[in-house]
Amino acid sequence: MSAPLVVAPVVVGFDGSTTALSAVHYGAREAQRRGSSLRIVHAFGWPVILPPFHAPYDQHDQGPRAAMLELLAQTAHEVGADHPHVPVTTRLIDGSPGAVLVDASRDAQLLVLGHRGLGGFAGLLVGSVAAQLTGHARCPVVVVRGDHPSDGAPVVLGTDGSPGANRAAEVAFEQAQLRDVELILAHHHPAGKGSAGAAVAGNPGFWATVGDPAAGGLGAGTRYPDVKYRTEVVPGDSVASALSAFARRTSAGVLVVGSRGLGGFRGLVLGSTSRNLIEHASCPVMVVPAVHDVD
């Protein structure tokens, strides 16, 4: 008799903040789509100073560890009531947020974070911890931003034909299939750099990655035949501003990008472009590690 298939969980980094709670509910919806469990993880460290007054976890009649354990249990109960078919577990792990969450990503299929936090996660996505997570996580990372669009919002993939775009395309097609929505393949073209259409048409890597409708579909498109997709050339001075504006204009449900790129996407995750996307995108941003990063 074969052993039952173990489905990797969706992991959410949680610190008690409002944005972290939003990330938990986002993660629960993702777990429900995927038929997986939800794991809520808090990286615990003793504060050097007292936490902000009236912070959700600031229970003056308890120690910080006991208060957080209670809050984790309460959060798991609430999200479980909203998503009764999603098994929910919690973990409090001693350590820094970056190290704890990178380790947690090793057996996760998705890591979800709020874009702002309190306590150990304060400033998480604007400093070295952000680079650590998006550069070293072993699974896709979603940074939850904005109001979550209603069902039917398209998935937008930012791609440039680089090898790292292959894995991002695979994940984006999977997302579109899970959500039963359209996938829009957005290729950035710098303003004033000639014909955008000609630039994309002359980029064989782009078409090999995302699929060429004229050739009957290549790349990830052949593995998701039920996903409807189209390509769009997105002009703009910078990748981040162009993709942010395009995601807003199309009311995207999630913006997917790879962690490595060529041309305008070079250094996407570790430089100013990634910070701008995370800070200004109107929707959740999913960063997908390159294949060689997860082997």
Image: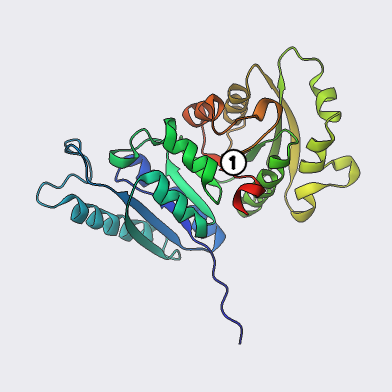
Q: Position of residue 93 (x, y in %)?
A: 33, 56
Q: Position of residue 37 (x, y in %)?
A: 46, 63
Using the rendered image of the protein, determine whether residue 34 is visible from the camera's viewpoint.
yes
Query: Residue sitting at 74 percent across and 42 percent down?
Result: 229
Q: Nearer the viewer, residue 65 or 210?
A: 65
137, above or below 52, in the image: below
Q: Secondary structure at mark 1?
A: loop
Number of numbered discs: 1
Q: Nearer the viewer, residue 71 or 287?
A: 287
Which quarter of the rendered picture does the C terminus lie within? bottom right
62 on left or right of 114: left
Which residue is under mark 1? 153
Query: Residue sitting at 72 percent across and 45 percent down?
Result: 166
Quadrant housing residue 109: bottom right
12, above or below 243, in the image: below
The three-letter code of the residue at mark 1 reads Ala
Query: Residue sitting at 42 percent across and 66 percent down?
Result: 87
90, above or below 136, in the image: below
Q: Position of residue 223 (x, y in %)?
A: 76, 55
Query: Residue sitting at 63 percent across and 24 percent down?
Result: 239
| Dot 1 crowding, Cα within 10 Å, few <14, some 14–19, many 20+ | some
Which quarter of the rendered picture does the N terminus lie within? bottom right
Q: Residue furthest top?
A: 192
Q: Residue furthest bottom?
A: 1
Quadrant housing residue 289: top right
45 on left or right of 90: left
185 on left or right of 6: right
Q: Position of residue 286 (x, y in %)?
A: 55, 41
162, above or below 8, in the image: above
